[in-house]
Image (cartoon, rainbow, N blue to C red):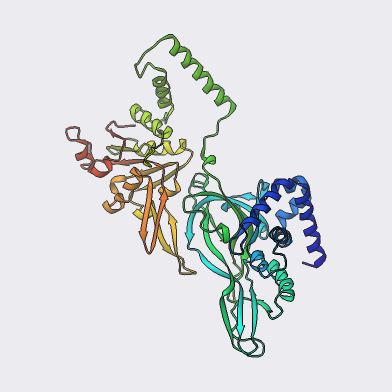
């Protein structure tokens, strides 16, 4: 980038901050200046909608070529924070520049994609990826600027470090050039590199001053497309995301997030390549997406019908007073929903009504003492083979906004809950989410529940009661949310349900029965 275009981009962003929502962004910059100490990372979140309102062409260029604007715009923010703190052209401005970042939020239009929709044509552009966090690596420090002491010349030598993931090193280099020439003439910068120097150009030995060097936190997470949006019969796609500084340790496996960043290809360390490069998203903002996308979408016609039924029930309640569950308004609605649930399956009316109640769920309560009472209902279906147990599970999956399906034989305890795996590239330990963590605030369907081993079945007992997954292995202790309802289907112990025996003797899952709110035996044959 030449000097003219660099200054033009700075002037454009300065005009934007001075004219568009000036009070809002000035307030953010003042808050950043109050907390600026050279060690805490600061990030100014800019809305793409505001940029589009200021200059639509500028917003389009930003999404298509973000690298042209990110460095000069971050430099503007850094200068304003330095001016507000009075640290302009001081020794502390170097660390302050390395801790100041720029993030983008708002509506990204066609650049808002899922991991499955990422293509080669989007490399180098800014994208907004939505999905579920499935893996999180540990946080490690990454050197940004190292300081070395030369005993022979009695001078400090600095070195900047750049790699294919560093997008803000230009800003640090500009600030260093201004600072070192005015405040500390004994500091001589070296050319940016990837390796730590052991000697200077004259062959003098250098000692690294770790206390004077500048670092940043670095973490790698994996965002996977939501289970409910993955096409049937295909593996869910995922993309790696690099988080730096203030973005690290803000998410955990199972969280639904919206991540905006630059989609970029990383170069190989070896000169001989196969032509396939590793692609990642260099995040600049990370927001929780919540579970709003899992809510059932209602059309205006659906809303009108719901209001119509509610008015009829209110009118009938005012005319007659009855306590009969069947003849009451709630009983009639429940019977009507049960009749419309899986109409291709004959019979099992009580089971269908129970599944309707499970999909609706109960009320979660948080007591003053800190205890929490779950509102999700766990259902276990036990019956003879060929009694439509699996079909009822599939019907619940089609109705539930968020559902994850698995089988007892093809699932392990760590696959259902969570696991600690080792990164093949870095060797670090990372946390991987299982089925119940991915189905947080949703439904987990487990078929062939009796085929699971006793050890794997015990792994979900905590999920069914406490709705959490606690891990304490490989030096990692974590607790993940698994607020989901469990719908399981199992065959009797003797192959056929014996009505003369107790349910505990037919099922053989004594511990699981204590955590099940509804148990029903399927004894009727369905043709």
Q: Is residue 465 visible?
A: yes
The image shows residue 521, relative to residue 54, as above or below, that is: above
Residue 289 percent coordinates (x, y): 55, 46
Q: Taking 230 as reference, is 339 left or right?
A: left
Residue pushed farthest front?
A: 86
Q: Give the residue drawn at x 39%, y 17%.
A: 328
Q: Is residue 47 visible?
A: no
Residue pushed farthest right?
A: 4
Q: Quadrant of residue 414?
A: bottom left
Residue 204 percent coordinates (x, y): 62, 89
Q: Taking 276 as reference, is 482 left or right?
A: left
Residue 137 percent coordinates (x, y): 48, 62
Residue pushed farthest top?
A: 319
Q: Quadrant of residue 151?
A: bottom right
The front one of 184 and 29 is: 184
Q: Give the residue drawn at x 80%, y 62%.
A: 7
Residue 323 percent coordinates (x, y): 35, 16
Give the position of the N terminus as an image quadrant. Answer: bottom right
The front one of 401 and 169 is: 169
User: What is the tally of numbered marks visible in this picture?
Assistant: 0
The front one of 20 and 422 is: 20
The image shows residue 25, relative to residue 300, as above or below, that is: below
Give the position of the C terminus as an image quadrant. Answer: top left
Q: Taking 423 as reference, is 69 left or right?
A: right
Q: Quadrant of residue 391?
A: top left
Q: Give the residue drawn at x 68%, y 53%.
A: 29
């Amino acid at each position: 980038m030449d000097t003219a275009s660099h200054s033009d981009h700075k002037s454009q962003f300065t005009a934007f901050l001075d004219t568009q929502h000036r009070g809002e962004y000035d307030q953010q910059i003042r808050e950043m200046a109050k907390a600026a100490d050279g060690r805490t990372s600061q990030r100014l979140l800019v809305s793409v909608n505001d940029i589009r309102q200021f200059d639509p062409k500028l917003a389009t260029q930003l999404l298509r070529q973000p690298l042209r604007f990110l460095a000069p715009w971050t430099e503007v923010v850094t200068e304003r924070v330095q001016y507000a703190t009075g640290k302009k052209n001081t020794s502390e401005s170097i660390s302050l520049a390395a801790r100041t970042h720029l993030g983008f939020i708002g509506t990204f239009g066609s650049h808002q994609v899922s991991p499955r929709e990422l293509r080669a044509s989007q490399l180098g552009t800014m994208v907004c990826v939505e999905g579920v966090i499935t893996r999180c690596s540990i946080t490690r420090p990454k050197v940004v600027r190292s300081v070395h002491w030369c005993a022979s010349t009695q001078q400090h030598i600095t070195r900047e470090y750049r790699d294919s993931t560093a997008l803000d090193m230009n800003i640090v280099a500009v600030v260093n050039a201004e600072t070192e020439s005015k405040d500390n003439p004994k500091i001589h910068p070296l050319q940016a590199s990837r390796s730590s120097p052991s000697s200077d150009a004259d062959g003098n030995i250098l000692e690294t001053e770790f206390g004077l060097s500048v670092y940043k936190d670095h973490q790698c997470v994996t965002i996977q497309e939501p289970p409910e949006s993955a096409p049937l019969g295909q593996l869910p796609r995922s993309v790696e995301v690099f988080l730096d500084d203030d973005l690290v340790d803000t998410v955990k496996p199972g969280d639904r997030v919206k991540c905006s960043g630059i989609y970029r290809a990383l170069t190989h360390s070896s000169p001989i390549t196969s032509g396939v490069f590793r692609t990642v998203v260099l995040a600049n903002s990370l927001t929780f997406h919540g579970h709003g996308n899992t809510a059932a979408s209602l059309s205006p016609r659906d809303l009108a019908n719901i209001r119509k039924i509610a008015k009829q029930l209110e009118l009938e309640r005012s005319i007659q007073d009855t306590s009969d569950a069947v003849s009451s308004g709630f009983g009639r609605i429940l019977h009507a929903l049960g009749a419309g649930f899986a109409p291709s399956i004959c019979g099992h009316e009580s089971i269908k009504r129970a599944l309707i109640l499970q999909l609706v769920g109960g009320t979660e309560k948080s007591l003053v003492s800190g205890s929490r009472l779950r509102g999700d209902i766990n259902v276990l279906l036990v019956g003879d083979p060929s009694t439509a147990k699996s079909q009822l599970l599939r019907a619940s999956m089609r109705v539930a906004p968020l559902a994850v399906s698995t089988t007892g034989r093809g699932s392990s305890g760590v696959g259902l809950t969570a696991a600690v795996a080792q990164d093949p590239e870095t060797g670090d330990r990372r946390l991987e989410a299982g089925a119940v963590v991915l189905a947080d605030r949703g439904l987990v369907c487990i078929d062939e529940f009796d085929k699971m081993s006793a050890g794997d079945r015990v792994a979900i007992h905590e999920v069914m009661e406490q709705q959490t997954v606690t891990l304490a292995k490989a030096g990692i202790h974590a607790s993940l949310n698994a607020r989901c309802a469990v719908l399981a289907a199992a065959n009797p112990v003797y192959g056929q349900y014996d009505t003369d025996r107790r349910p505990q003797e037919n099922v053989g899952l004594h511990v699981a029965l204590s955590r099940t709110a509804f148990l029903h035996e399927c004894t009727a044959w369905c043709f």
